[in-house]
Image: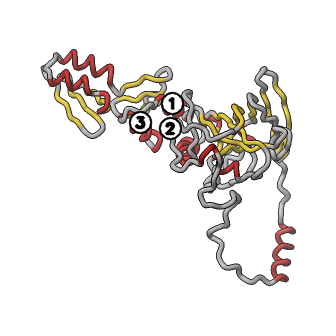
Amino acid sequence: MSVSYIITDNTVTLNYSDGELDVLPIGRAGSVLEAIKAGLPEAEVRKRASAAALVCDYMNGTVKVEHGRVLYKGEELHGFLVDKILEFANKGYPYKSLLAFLERLMANPSNRAITELYQFLERGSLAITDDGKFRAYKSIQPDWTDWHSGKCDNHIGNILEMPRRCVDDNCNNGCSHGFHVGTLDYVHGFHPGTGIIVIVEVDPADVVSVPVEDCGKVRVCKYKVVGKYTGPLPSYLHTNPDPAPDGDWVPQDGSDGGDPEDPDDGDDEELDEDDLDNDLDQLRDHAVPEEPQTQHITITKPSGSQVFITVNQ
């Protein structure tokens, strides 16, 4: 019995005699269509389809792409990342790293991080590794410690982590307590001309906040230092349309890399100094001192030894 089929720009849908369907990416359906045109038995068509089908039990079956749907533990998912996975699969691009990324991301307790992280990575041309983690950048002092406390050792191979509850999850706060990692543009504008830029690796499950303002960074509770920056990372899944030659960083706006002026700033109104002083006095009278945030940080060395430090922010 012949197999009926429908061809679109991206897929081939096969309809078998028992009512079952197979949906194949167009780039992988050549041998299946040849079998149908040659009048081969349905069993042969099924056999060829099973080899090319858009069906992938992945990571112990937790994440699955099946008949044009992305499932996580049997639940169908939707959203920007899901659309990207299906786009990659339909066009025959490697997409298993995206599935691994999705599985790790689904372990993140923050719905906002799940929704927004991939788009942040795509905007910043940050690479996703084969095992589903992502690479980003961090600016540190010449002695390999952090700029804020001078206590966090960021030598290559070290893993730095703090309790998730100690990281500010308010996406409306651009700068706040927690580890910050970000894009190359972001770190080049942070203490420009000084220090070291390192490459860090982050599990999507450890991202706590994606700030609303487009500041080029995210807050995380854990990261691993995997290298020293010597040139742009390869974009495994993303492409920078205007890469600078020889790994040099060039601001897209032609500036010197400093913070741009606020475009929302209008003409300053004239202020009465006496009124301003009175307003400041009232604010001081009613202000409540902010309690310092105490962060307990664990640094794991490549040897496996651990260092425990306390930092106040």
The numbered disc on residue 237 is 2
The numbered disc on residue 71 is none
Task: Give the quarter of the image for residue 160.
Answer: top right
The one nearer the camera, 229 or 98, is: 229
Q: Earlier in the sequence, mark 3 or mark 2?
A: 3
The one nearer the camera, 9 or 222, is: 9
Q: Position of residue 53 (x, y in %)?
A: 33, 25
Task: Give the quarter of the image for residue 57.
Answer: top left
Task: Give the quarter of the image for residue 69.
Answer: top left
Q: What residue does disc 3 label? A: 88
Q: Residue at x 81, y 25 (%)?
A: 306
**Which secondary structure lies at badge 2?**
loop
Q: Is residue 288 depicted above or below 245 in this figure?
A: below
Q: Nearer the viewer, mark 2 or mark 1?
A: 2
Residue 115: in sight, yes or no? no
Q: Residue at x 59, y 48 (%)?
A: 244
On the picture, is 65 further left or further right than 176? left
Instruction: Kindly check if marks 2 and 1 are in contact, taking CB atoms under 8 A apart as contact.
Output: yes
Check disc 2 and give the amino acid type.
Leu
**Cα–Cα span, label 2 and label 1:** 9 Å
The numbered disc on residue 97 is 1
**Which secondary structure lies at badge 3?**
helix
Q: Earlier in the sequence, mark 2 or mark 1?
A: 1
Residue 211: in sight, yes or no? yes
Check disc 1 and give the amino acid type.
Ser
The one nearer the camera, 205 or 44, is: 44
Instruction: Kindly check if marks 3 and 2 are in contact, taking CB atoms under 8 A apart as contact.
Output: no
**Cα–Cα span, label 1 and label 3:** 11 Å
Q: Residue at x 67, y 79 (%)?
A: 267
Check disc 3 and give the amino acid type.
Phe
